[in-house]
Image (spheres, rainbow, N blue to C red):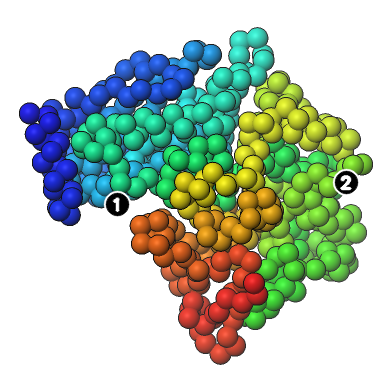
Amino acid sequence: MKKVCQLLVTLMLAAGLPAAIPAKSACAAVSAPAVPGARVLSVSGVERPAGEAGMPGRPPITGVPARCEVTVVLSHPDTDDRVRVEVWLPLRGWTGRFLGTGGGGFATGFSAEGLAPAVKDGFAAAATDGGIGLNPISPAAWALDASGRVNWGLLTNFATRSVHDMTVVGKAVTRSFYGRAPAYSYWNGCSTGGRQGLAEAQLHPRDYDGIVAGGPAIDMPRSSLAQFWPQVVMNQERTRPSACEFDAFTRAAVDDCDLLDGVADRVIGDPAACRFDPARLVGTKTPCGTTITAATAEVVRRIWDGPRGHTGRLGQGLVKGGSFAELAGAAPLPIADNWIRYFLGRDPGMDTTKIDYSAFERLVFASTATYDHLLANTRPDLSAFRAAGGRLLVWHGLADAEIAPGTTIDYRERVERVTGPADGFFRLFLAPGSGHCGTGVGVAPVDPMGAMIAWVERGRAPDTLAAATADGRTTRDLCRHPRVPIYDGHGDPDSATSFRCSGD
């Protein structure tokens, strides 16, 4: 009976008709997948009706279709782990596509947060907890073993292993359920999810036909220290500007560099070209009544300039136009602080406020030397991914305070040098004014996956990427790097039609 049902589904999909699965029997009868290097402990499936879905403590996602939810639990012989992989399969309207979903911070995936939107769009989709849980802020539950040593097995899961395992499981479950393999496989993730996508292209070039990676947290052993740099500067210079004072510098930089793209929209279109010197504000009054001092301007200069030591530059600085709030607030960015305490100090109680410039430089060297092999994920040779026919679409906000856009730009340029002309398979789009993963006042892509599907399935390589502000009032077409949007001088500055891409 099962084979008859699967044949019926295959014929319906081939004819472009929505697939209806006898869910109760098919969902419970999914075969256990073979996962190289891992042992499958259990496979279970349950039918869910159409309605809401979501995670505890988060707003529910509405309009989720009826689906089969399959959970596969697996383990690795070198790690006493229990990795949970979830695969959601729509009961009707499967498009023949599979989607791998990514995580954020210290989480490898977000369960329903990524899966519900995917099945709404007709994907069979997968997510994994990597055996480490779903906490994106703190790795306290898994980073160190009982002896206080780094748990290398679980860190390997976090770095790359769990995503490849999830992909193998997801495709196998999809094939078992529908009776045929996915016609196309895609990846979608931002931040850690973006890093995971790039790692897949580098290490497992045949896993995905198309990878969408937003604000990728690549070069993590170095970037995590760069995120902590503003705290080191403020502590060492014994000067902590107020939020009001930081805002004054951001406003002044925008005032000075706003028109670089030809339009006054309170967004710096090309932060790398902004040459505003914070010393120009010394002696001026802020809206909160304070006067900018030379010491305050020097703190801002060092934060914008980025980490430096006796050996030279140690990382990227805060981009001009990006918010100081997350990295230079009263407390450090928790992810950066936890990276230092758990993976460098191996001491959850470590007092990171005592880190001076010399100690910071030593930490950068220790971090990169110890963890680059797992978590840099910046291998520039993508020739195998290109040969496999893969397509890579990366976007990054130009006001991203958490992950400096320069890290992504540098990576794209190194790929070009090592792999050769890359536009045929790898395109980068930069979003003016956009913060991390689309936050902030600027525009962010509205449907990058749609652009990827058109590229993979119809050969339409995106030259621009449609973007908009969160409220939809401003639209802009993001330009394929290294081109930039230039205002035409007379059209509606809030309309994408008033801009053209210029400057290869």
- Residue sitting at x 37%, y 45%: 185
Q: Looking at the image, is mark 2 or mark 1 earlier in the sequence?
A: 1
Task: Specify the quadrant of the image occupied by residue 268.
Answer: bottom right
Closer to us: 294 or 304: 304
In the picture, measured across the screen, residue 477 lies left or right of residue 337, that is: left
In the picture, measured across the screen, residue 272 lies left or right of residue 441, that is: right
Q: Position of residue 190 (x, y in %)?
A: 51, 47
User: Dot 1, how many residues are within 10 Å of its Cα: few (below 14), some (14-19), or many (20+)?
Assistant: some
Tell me the residue that label 1 is attached to: 121
Observer able to see residue 355: no
* Residue 7 versus residue 291 in the image, above or below: above
**Quarter that holds the N terminus:** top left
- The type of residue carrying mark 2 is Gly
Task: Specify the quadrant of the image occupied by residue 310.
Answer: top right
* Residue 64 versus residue 349 in the image, above or below: below
Closer to us: 407 or 168: 168
